[in-house]
Structures are given as structure tokens and as C-alpha cells.
Amino acid sequence: MSSAPITVSIRREVDPAHISEATTWVQTGVNLAHKYPGFLGSGWVRAGDDSQVWHMLYRFASTETLEAWEQSPERTWWLSMGQGFIRSERSRRRTGIEGWFDEPPTGAINLPDTATVESVSPAPARWKQAVTIWLGFFPVNLLFSLAMTPIPGWGELPLWLRVLVTTLVLTPIMTYWVLPWVTRALRSWLAR
């Protein structure tokens, strides 16, 4: 039985004396994972040139394909190659929108020799997620609609084209600014 796509978020603390090796090591891991069936993509960032904390995301088509990668001899070899310069690691799995409602991980978990998967606190109830999204989407959509109304010809465009333009403009606004702000503002309510 196949499951939904799954994203893994990893936070690693890297020895600053080994940044060059760590960069090569991370890219090698991405290249190895890329060869596995179900691999959908990945990315990694550092907060700055001197940052010791690195964040990585990778996504697989299902839990089964992710587990095949995680249990592979290639991944085991790759992880062993990082033991000299990876000081700590934290890993979380996400299957959908619930990641928007999480507090970013902070601090570090010291690891003896192997990576650990941190258990994730439950996401808010779906109805709370829906209310949160609506509280962000309604005012933004209303303001956009009001702003577009005086534009000559806007009302005469086919509905599908107006909806296309609206969603193309509002989706990044919601994703990068509105939803993070709303979830921070409602954090205590979402956690109850």
C-alpha cells in the first residue's frame, strides 16, 4: 500500500573547521538519493557563511520509497562519512500542510554515532488548520479583489483567467508572509 509523498526536514550542526568537507558531503548525499526510485527533490541552506547550523529538506513519493533510501547501504555509507564533522542532527518527517504549523526546531541534539528521528508533536486539528488558513486568506483575497476592481477590463475577463491571476499572485503572498504571520499569532490557540 502506497502512502502520500513525505518530506524530511533535517537540522545539522557542522564543525566550522570542516565546512568544505561538509559541503561536499551534503551534495554527495543528494546525488546518491537522486538515484533512488521515488526521490522528488531536495535542498539545503546555511544561515550565513559562518553558520554552523545547516537545514536540509528532501522528499520522496511515499513512505515506502523513503524507507528504501533510509535503509540502503549507500545511505549508511554516506552517513558514516559525515561522522567526523557533523556534531548533531535532528530530523522530522512531514506529509502535508501540517509543517506550516510547527515551531522551527532550535537547539541541538548531540549524537553519539547515529542519527535519530525526533518524534513530532501532533499537528493542530484539521479544523484549526482550516480556520487559520481562512483567517489569512479571506482578508488578503478581499483586499486583492478590491484593488483589482477599478482596473479597466478586469471584470470582463473570463472567470478562469481572473482566478488564475488571483491565485498566482496570492499563493506566494500566503505562503511566505501571511500564513507564517497568522500561525505565529495563533500559536497558543493552535497548540491547545
Image (spheres, helix red, strand yellow):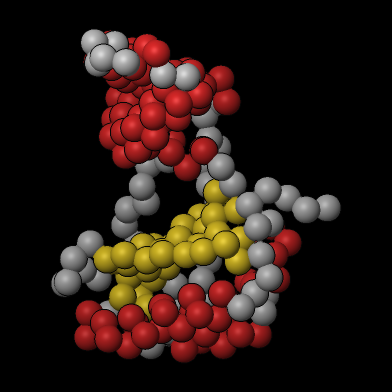
State the image coordinates of residue 62 (x, y, percent, origin top left). 68, 56
Q: Count the marks.
A: 0
- Residue 192 sits above or below residue 171 on the image: above
- Residue 143 sits above or below residue 28 on the image: above
- Residue 124 sits above or below residue 117 on the image: above
Residue drawn at the location 56% of the way across and 25% of the way down: 125
Residue drawn at the location 16% of the way across and 72% of the way down: 50
- Residue 174 sits above or below residue 128 on the image: below
The one nearer the camera, 77 or 176, is 176
Left or right of 125: which side holds 83?
A: left
The picture quadrant where one finds residue 38 is: bottom right
Residue 110 in sight from this viewpoint? no
State the image coordinates of residue 113 (x, y, percent, origin top left). 49, 80
The picture quadrant where one finds residue 12 is: bottom left
Residue drawn at the location 52% of the way across and 76% of the way down: 114
State the image coordinates of residue 155 (x, y, percent, origin top left). 37, 12
Left or right of 134: which side holds 36?
A: right
State the image coordinates of residue 58 (x, y, percent, origin top left). 50, 62
Residue 49 in sight from this viewpoint? yes
Left or right of 69: which side holds 115?
A: left
Left or right of 167: which side holds 160?
A: right
The one nearer the camera, 90 or 54, is 54
